[in-house]
Every structure is written in C-alpha cells, then in structure tokens.
Image (cartoon, rainbow, N blue to C red):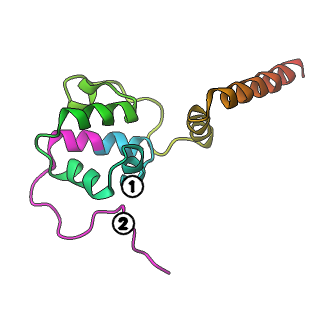
C-alpha cells in the first residue's frame, strides 16, 4: 500500500509562517474540500504553483488573485484579507449534493435546464405524496 500523497506538504517544515494571502488561500481551498491539485486544475496551473502561493508568495499577481477569487467564489477583498465573511455551513468537505450541484453548474445550459426540469418534476411529485 502506498501512503504517499502529493497533496500533503513534504520536505522540511517551514521556519516561518506562510504569508497572510497564502494562509487565506489554503483555508478557502480546504473549506471547499479541495486538494492543491484540484485547485490547480480549476486555475489551470500546477500543484507546485498552488504550494508556492500558499506557503511563500509575498506579493501574488493581481491576475492570479482575481482568478483564484473567482474560482473560490469569494471577493478579492475577502481573499486578500481586507474583508472578512462569516463562515458558511459546517467545516470540512462539502456534502455529496453540493458536489453534484457544482458538477451540474459546469454543464452546458441545455443540460442544466434538463436537470432543473427533472428536479422540479421530482419535487412536485414528492410534494403530492
């Protein structure tokens, strides 16, 4: 059995705390239940770059901050720390239903409409029971 996981920090422990931006980025990523690799895929970058932004980047580019905020569905202000937002829901990975809705959100519009009609039909049927 292989216990190696590339999404877990490896190597020597850091000698200083990560920059505030990196701490916020990591916390938001974890609150969605995403690994560094999953966030990297959503941002079309590498896991190593996410590790860099989370652990060492002191002055990330505005372009990266904007893309990360969009993917994480937060404001730029919240991501850089100039605005705080109360925690939503429970900590930990999102429930299966939330994951499914995220997948549906990425479908083409026509397929989304089909799913919505299906859900409406099922909910209407459940309401009559």
Q: Main secondary structure of the magenta part?
A: loop
Q: Residue at x 84, y 24 (%)?
A: 126
C-beta proximity under 8 Å, tags 1 and 2: yes
From this view, report whether residue 76 is shown above or below residue 71.
Answer: above
Magenta span includes 53: no
Could you tell me which secondary element the residue under label 2 belongs to? loop
Q: Residue at x 26, y 68 (%)?
A: 10
Lower sequence index among marks 1 and 2: 2
Task: Check disc 1: other Cα within 10 Å, few if <14, some if 14-19, many if 20+.
Answer: some
Disc 2 designates what residue? 6
Task: Check disc 2: other Cα within 10 Å, few if <14, some if 14-19, many if 20+.
Answer: few
Q: Give the x, y percent position of residue 56.
A: 15, 51
Q: Which mark is residue 37?
A: 1
Q: Quadrant of residue 8?
A: bottom left
Question: Horizontally, is 16 left or right of 63 in the view?
Answer: left
Give, as a single range, the part of the protein colored magenta. Answer: 1-25
Question: Horizontally, is 74 left or right of 99 in the view?
Answer: left
Q: Marks 1 and 2, how far apart in space?
A: 8 Å
Q: Which mark is residue 115?
A: none
Q: Nearer the viewer, residue 101 or 82?
A: 101
Q: Give the x, y percent position of residue 33.
A: 45, 47
From this view, report whether residue 49 is shown above or below residue 75.
Answer: below
From this view, report whether residue 99 is shown above or below residue 121.
Answer: below
From this view, report whether residue 19 is shown above or below residue 77.
Answer: below
Q: Residue at x 47, y 36 (%)?
A: 90
Q: Residue at x 31, y 42 (%)?
A: 27
Magenta span includes 16: yes
Q: Quadrant of residue 74?
A: top left
Q: Give the x, y percent position of residue 99.
A: 57, 41
Question: Horizontally, is 103 left or right of 48 in the view?
Answer: right
Q: Residue furthest right?
A: 129
């Amino acid at each position: 059995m292989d216990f190696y996981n590339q999404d877990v920090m490896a190597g020597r422990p850091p000698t200083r705390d990560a920059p505030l931006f990196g701490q916020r980025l990591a916390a938001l990523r974890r609150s969605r239940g995403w690994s560094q690799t999953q966030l990297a895929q959503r941002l079309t970058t590498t896991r190593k770059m996410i590790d860099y932004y989370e652990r060492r980047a002191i002055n990330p580019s505005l372009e990266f901050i904007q893309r990360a905020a969009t993917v994480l569905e937060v404001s730029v202000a919240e991501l850089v720390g100039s605005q705080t937002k109360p925690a939503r829901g429970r900590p930990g990975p999102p429930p299966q239903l939330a994951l499914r809705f995220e997948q549906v959100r990425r479908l083409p519009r026509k397929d989304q409409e089909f799913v919505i009609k299906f859900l409406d039909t099922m909910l209407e049927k459940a309401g009559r029971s």
